[in-house]
Image (cartoon, rainbow, N blue to C red):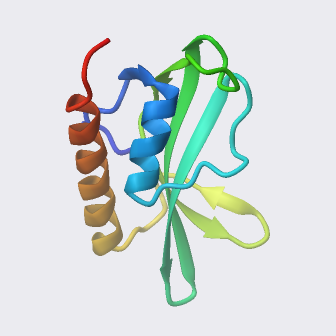
Amino acid sequence: MKLNGTELDEQIVDFSRLTEIMNDYGFVLAGQWDYERATYDYKFELLKDVYYLRVQAYAIEGDLGGRHARVKLLTPLLGKHYYPHGVEYGEKEQFPNNVVQKSKQLLHNVSAALKALPTD
């Protein structure tokens, strides 16, 4: 499920600052990055179901292993994990209302934190 209208779509930010903010809100980068792309995950566990809120970014200046990389954010995704197949984002997926609302709130908070950063 794409979460449109979050104000994160197409935003360009410093990668290290983005990572700090995402960490502050419980998103994990872990090993989900290479020199051009990164994915931040927020995990929801409800009974036997697992959902992931994903924010993806790709480098537009520098590389993500360097000190001065800038990234462009993509439309956030909400997906349901199916063991052992992986995460599905399809329109046919059903998501609990509390997961959708919490996802929107998290994305709003991240967006507000990014807006509060000093401009370079």
Q: Is residue 8 above or below residue 51?
A: above
Q: Residue at x 56, y 74 (%)?
A: 50
Q: Which is more toward the observer, 23 or 10?
A: 23
Is residue 11 found left or right of 40 in the rendered image?
A: left
Quadrant assignment, res 41: bottom right
Q: How many marks?
A: 0
Q: Residue at x 29, y 73 (%)?
A: 98
Q: Residue at x 54, y 47 (%)?
A: 40
Quadrant assignment, res 21: top left
Q: Could you tell me if residue 1 is visible in this image?
A: no
Q: Is residue 101 above or below residue 32?
A: below
Q: Could you tell me if residue 75 is visible in this image?
A: yes
Q: Position of residue 83 (x, y in %)?
A: 74, 73
Is residue 50 found left or right of 107 in the rendered image?
A: right
Q: Is residue 109 above or below residue 37?
A: below
Q: Position of residue 118 (x, y in %)?
A: 25, 22
Q: Residue at x 36, y 28 (%)?
A: 9
Is residue 50 found left or right of 118 in the rendered image?
A: right
